[in-house]
Image (cartoon, rainbow, N blue to C red):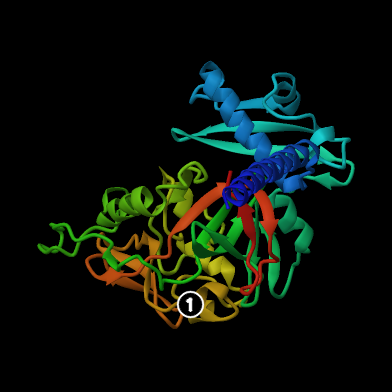
Amino acid sequence: MNKLLTTLKENKKKVFIFGGIAILTIILLIILIVIFVNIFKRYDYQEIETIMVNETKNYLKRNPSLLPTEENPLITIEASTLINEKYMKDFSRLSKDSNCYGSINVIYNNGYIRYSPSLSCTNYETTSLYDTLLQNEAIVTESNGLYEMNNYYTYRGEYVNNYLNFANENWRILKFNENEIYLILSDTANKMDPVVFDDRYNESLNSNRGYNNFESSRIEESLTEIYNNFFANYKNYLLTMDACVHTRSENDYDNSGAIECYTTYPTPISLLPAYDYINASIDPLCKTVSSGNCTNYNYLSKASNDWWLLNGTNENTYDVYRVNTRGTIALERASVKNHLRVVIAIPSNILYKSGDGTQSNPYEIYPY
């Protein structure tokens, strides 16, 4: 019996030893596989762009003196620098398409830093949203589509493919050039509550009907609060615009922007100037803010709530233009609450990711 017990113990010990060796062998094999995969893994082009951005951030952490500043707002880091200093592998070890070179623009924007990679390979070229829009849209002179006007490419008509997803919201692309792309919220049905344009005491009326001067209005304060909260994680993408805040008459016919842009106000967040609403319509009788025809053939005319425009009338100090749910522009006293369709501008060279601009497949961008 003792001999049997001894044999069992010895066998159990052998099983334990062999089992341990087997487990250790499996672990070593897994480690070797992981190392092998990491050494020989190949990335797609977008992943390589992300690697370039991440390693640029690491490089600048160790070289903070190279960071862009307000006085020197743009620097360029070559991918070859990152490769030579061992921050990233050579392109031949990252991609099957080894004939690549790249760089990363690092941009200072209102106190924030934005990264814009550029990768060029035999079978790939980094594509900006600006280039994609021009590739997807033919320039037209009639009907729905993209027009050249007032030094911008401008979307006009009722049916245009200008939807874009940004900051977890749906937007419409208003207009763009090689420097900036203007966006407006696609609707008023969002998290933003209706607000007064202004409700200060106006001595010309002896009442709190407010003033229609945007620069010193309550609505400017509301937009600043939205900028600081709603766009807290996206400030490095929002450009400072020259918001066109000058007043206009209901009978003014000039829709080039000359009237509203006579006075401008620098801001990263704004509302829609009246002339941009008029220009979105392709109805030939839409000439002034008082024209009901501006509701026709106008993708901006559809909204869930009444919403403020940026401009007041020049005929008094307290009425402001707003658009109702039928798409008609009318004057409203500044102290009334209306909804907001915020306008922002993003860089034209921001990277295109996917989408064709339709409502079901909006444009998507890479936020670096």
**Residue under numbered circle 1:** 291
- Looking at the rendering, which quadrant does residue 54 occupy? top right
Q: State whether residue 72 appears in this view.
A: no
Query: Up-down: is 180 above or below 32?
Result: below
241 displayed left or right of 136: left
Residue at the (24%, 70%) spot, across then down: 336
Q: Where residue 315 sits in the image (x, y, percent)?
A: 31, 63
View extreme (front): residue: 1
Tell me which amino acid carries mark 1: Ser
Q: Nearer the viewer, residue 45 or 288?
A: 45
- Residue at 27 percent of width and 65 percent of height: 195
166 above or below 78? below
| Residue 57 coordinates in the image, percent (x, y) | 57, 30
Q: Secondary structure at mark 1?
A: loop
The residue located at (61%, 73%) in the rendering is 359
Residue plotted at (72% across, 47% down): 46
Q: Say whether residue 194 is left or right of residue 266.
A: left
Number of other residues with Cα within 10 Å of mark 1, as a class: few under 14, some 14 to 19, many 20 or more? some
The answer to whether 194 is drawn above or below residue 24 in the figure is below
